[in-house]
Image (cartoon, grey):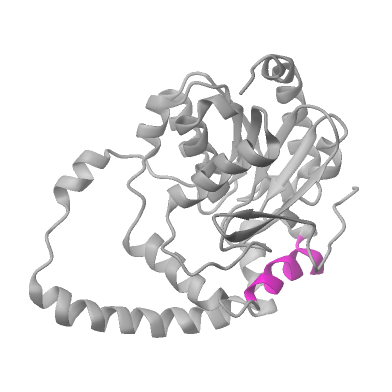
Amino acid sequence: MERLPFKPEGYNFWTWRDHQIHYVVQGEGPPIVLIHGFGASVFHWRYNIPQLAKKFKVYAVDLLGFGWSEKAIIDYNALVWSNQVADFLKEIVKEPAILVGNSLGGFTALITAADCSEYVSAVAILNSAGQFGNPEDQAKNDKEETAIQRIIINPLKNLFQRAVLSFAFWQAKQPSRIMSILKSVYPNSTNVDDYLVESIIRPADDPNAGEVYYRLMTQFMFNPSRVTLNSIFEKLSCPLLLLWGDLDPWVGPSKANKIKEIYPNSSIIHLQAGHCPHDEVPELVNEALLNWALPLSSQASTKTI
């Protein structure tokens, strides 16, 4: 299949809140914005961008802290990325767009669509991240830290976490380790190749990458997002497509089925693929996206910001 040429120097850059954000844009027509998952980049959409660009103006953006975007030393959370995508729509795309996201990118797309409906005409998610639950109940369960916890226990815990995660980061960016992880989530590992591995390794060589990895992992492991899927679907109003790799060892098809129950304005397409169906079976994902998005594009073109 035709694929996006790999450029070590990246494609285009946009300054967002004094940080450099990397993105790709190809094609002409109604806009589609592709948002990658954890640890990935715009190059994870290598087989999707050229095909979708035959009918749409396709944007793919690297989230802050990932890919070719700046490895900013900040406190990361889901709202950082949804704010980034919302501003990308306002400043770069400049018209309502269809958002397509995998894993973390799917969760980011959902939050953006729920909070900024005027900029989003529809959303497609592939094996999306995000938890069900009630944020009010979670808040009630939070316990106030004691002085001993703040002064003694937490610093020791943080020191231990940093040591463990520093080793984990060093190990995680080894080519053999990356290849092993990818093959575990790509049941058909045909597309697990040097291009894919290089697109993951290169950003990890950034001087700030280790610190960003530490901040991301501690956030996800010990301070999960208070934004739940339930709260998102209470606000979401646009059409939703669920493209689900049913062989995903991390996020199984039951999650897609539950989303469909909660949010009836959605359609599900089950695929025999793992966590990243857009890269494992790109021809099926491209066909499904085009069949779903083309009828919506005329509606989106009548909506103005």
Q: Locate residue 71, reporting x and y percent.
A: 57, 68
Q: Is residue 187 above or below residue 213?
A: above
Residue closest to the eye, 68 or 153: 68
Q: Residue at x 45, y 32 (%)?
A: 115
Q: Is residue 202 left or right of residue 87?
A: right
Q: Is residue 47 left or right of residue 113?
A: right
Q: Residue at x 64, y 19 (%)?
A: 304
Instruction: Residue at the far right: name it.
Output: 2
Residue 202 colored in magenta in the image: yes
Residue closest to the eye, 47 or 13: 13
Q: Residue at x 27, y 79 (%)?
A: 157
Q: Is residue 26 left or right of residue 212?
A: right
Number of numbered tags placed on the structure image: 0
Q: Is residue 300 above or below residue 162?
A: above
Q: Can see residue 29?
A: yes
Residue 171 colored in magenta in the image: no
Q: Locate residue 24, reporting x and y percent.
A: 77, 50
Q: Is residue 295 left or right of residue 153?
A: right
Magenta segment: 192-204
Q: Residue at x 9, y 77 (%)?
A: 148
